[in-house]
Amino acid sequence: LWDLCRAPQRKYAVPVQVAMGRHADSIVVEDRETAVACIQYLKQERLATCVFIPLDAVHAPPLDVALRQLGGSKRLVHDVIEFDPALRRAVLYAVGNTVVCDTLQEARELRFGTDGTAATRVKCVTLDGSLIHKSGMMTGGVSGVEGVAQRYSEAEVGRLQRRRDECVEELCDLGRTMRSQAHEEHLATQLETLAGTQEHVAKDLAMTAAKRDELAGQLAVVEKDLRKLNAQLARLAGEAEGSERKALLQQIEEAEAGIFEAFSRRVGVENIRQKERQRLEAKREYTKRMTEFENQKARLENQLEYEEKRDIGVTVARLEGRIAEEEEHVEKLRAALTGLARSQDGLGEKLGALEAQVAQEHERVQAVVQQTKERKREADKLAKQLTDITRKITAHESEMYALRNQRRQILRDCKLSQIDLPLSDDAEMADVDVPMGTQTLDAPQTQSESADAEGDAGAGERVALDYSSLRKNLRNIKRSADYDARCRDFEAKLRSVTAQLENIAPNMKAIEQYHSVENRLDEAQRNFEEARSRSREAGQRFHAVREQRKERFMEAFSHIQENIDKIYKELTKRGGQHGGNAYLSVENPDEPYLSGIKYNAMPPRKRFSDLDQLSGGEKTVAALALIFAIHSYQPSPFFVLDEVDAALDPNNVNRVAKYVKSRVEENAFQCIVISLKDQFFEKCDALIGIFRDQKQECSRTLTLNLAERFEE
């Protein structure tokens, strides 16, 4: 949980850690199922126990908003830390309504009250780590949390390092500024040499105008061809879409009318389609009459059967007459049906002939469709040609746009250089737009100028130059070779004039200024190199000390880590069985001396658990194993054990006494033990007893050398 929170102010790091308590190392999970799965994994791998806080099941106390109105330095711990809103329930569960105060006196006044204020039953913590519980119990000390607070020191070091890098970069910028002064002087000299480029610029403008007219003519021709192609394409598309279906339907109808013309005249109908409709109507009428007949027959049969059962002679005679009439009617209908069937057979033969003719017409239609597809391919070719022409138009427009921008840039340079160009009567140099911030002629075009190029195109076109002042031979240049030759001549003249200007007006103080700037630059460079060297040496010394510190710490830690398990096994060994397990682990492998060390001990035939969950005797044995392991690294002359067996049972007292006895016999250390249990002091080499002398009313001592008695 602590890794998911952050105290923006460094002073609150320790009180936040104390307020969280054991929940600072708790693991936050999304739901209860995840927590159960993690616990099962820890059990299977026999790892250390961990506390999990499921966000969906944790019961967090409600935040008491009234505590925010206490005033003074008193603030809720919940308000002095930053965290993800999704973790709010976990943070409230860990810190609750704990209040942080600057001093212990403020915390006491808040919790216990004063003469003028009532006591507030709330958990309080101070900046130095002192804690007052709701019950009134007070605890102090910040052991174990200094490593967490040290993280903010590392952040401060990182900030200072970034500030150092910024200072170094500013120093480099200062050197570049000094070099830019010489560059500005060079640019000023170059600006003066460009004053004589008027004729060259005028020639470039004339060539640009001629090329523009030529491209405009080409563009008109291309646009004319494009309009013709568009009209042809529209005509072909209309023919392909509208007339194809109509033509096919008309051809089919004409073919049917021609084939069945004689038959239609013979049967007395306008066309074969009318005859087909009549035949279908007759067939439907016959089907309807047959259905009615069958229904009537069934009804009469039912009625006859009914009447027969009634044995009524008159009714039977009447019905028989009616049946005879109906049978005659049926015979007539059958005769008519036979005639219609013969007619249908004749029509079927004619229909077969018509289907053959329809197949021929279908072939003709396929031929027409194939012809239409060929016309579509021709239309696609024309569309491709149109696309190529459009691409060429776009390329010419881009070239014209580039030439227009080049002309506008030349006009801007002339305006900045205050070069008077020969203009027409209605044109002025004020029409040329000069962007803000432009200082030199060779300055690159900025992004804003590129973005506004289209809007400024009209401004450049409004400035019309007057070429009448040029010589006739310069105005009539047509070939590019002649143009290049004239350019070389003008460049040679420009170099000659530039050399004359340099000889006429030299800068007499240029060398002195150059040497002065160079000396300042060298001095700044030396200072920079010295500062960087000192910084590098300090960093190397710091890293060397840190590595040496880590090496010495890990040397002691490795020795203690190797011996603590052996010592713990000897202290917990029972008969022929193996003893328990104990090991150490660092919380911060990179800088272990800045954080804590986790000590885990597992007594024999017990599950793995934290030291907090062990009994008093088991904690004592684990602590003794740690003391003996630390003593084995750099042994002291002797040390004192003051009633370390108070929480031990007789078996553990006997094992600890045997271990101390064995180490003394090996001359590993000397030990003074204060004990009240005979299982311990009966194995000593000497006993010193303290008793009260009633007569003298003082304490007296008695000594007994057990080693000499055992030898006797």
Image (tube, rainbow, N blue to C red):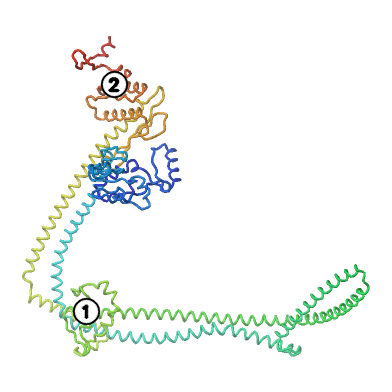
* Amino acid identity at mark 1: Arg
Residue 343 figure quarter: bottom right
Which residue position is annotated with label 2?
675
Q: Secondary structure at mark 1?
A: helix
Between 424 and 479, the one lying in front of the other is 424
* x, y percent for residue 269: 73, 88
Residue located farthest toward the right when viewing the structure as drawn: 313
* x, y percent for residue 208: 27, 83
Camera sees residue 473: no
Establish if 590 lies above or below 613: below
- Other-residue count near label 2 (Cα within 10 Å), few / some / many at <14 / 14–19 / ≥20: some
Identify the residue at horizontal 11%, vertical 59% (top origin). 522
Residue 640 figure quarter: top left
Report the disc number at residue 404.
Answer: none
Which residue position is annotated with label 1?
412
Between 497 and 438, the one lying in front of the other is 438
Find the distance from the CA under tag 1 to the CA under tag 2. 103 Å
Q: Is residue 353 left or right of residue 366?
A: right
Residue located farthest toward the top when viewing the structure as drawn: 712
- Other-residue count near label 1 (Cα within 10 Å), few / some / many at <14 / 14–19 / ≥20: many
Foreground mark, 1 or 2, reads 2
Between 513 and 62, the one lying in front of the other is 62
Identify the residue at horizontal 32%, vertical 17% (top origin). 678
Establish if 169 lies above or below 589: below
Identify the residue at horizontal 15%, vertical 79% (top origin). 195
* x, y percent for residue 220: 37, 87
Q: Is residue 406 left or right of residue 419?
A: right
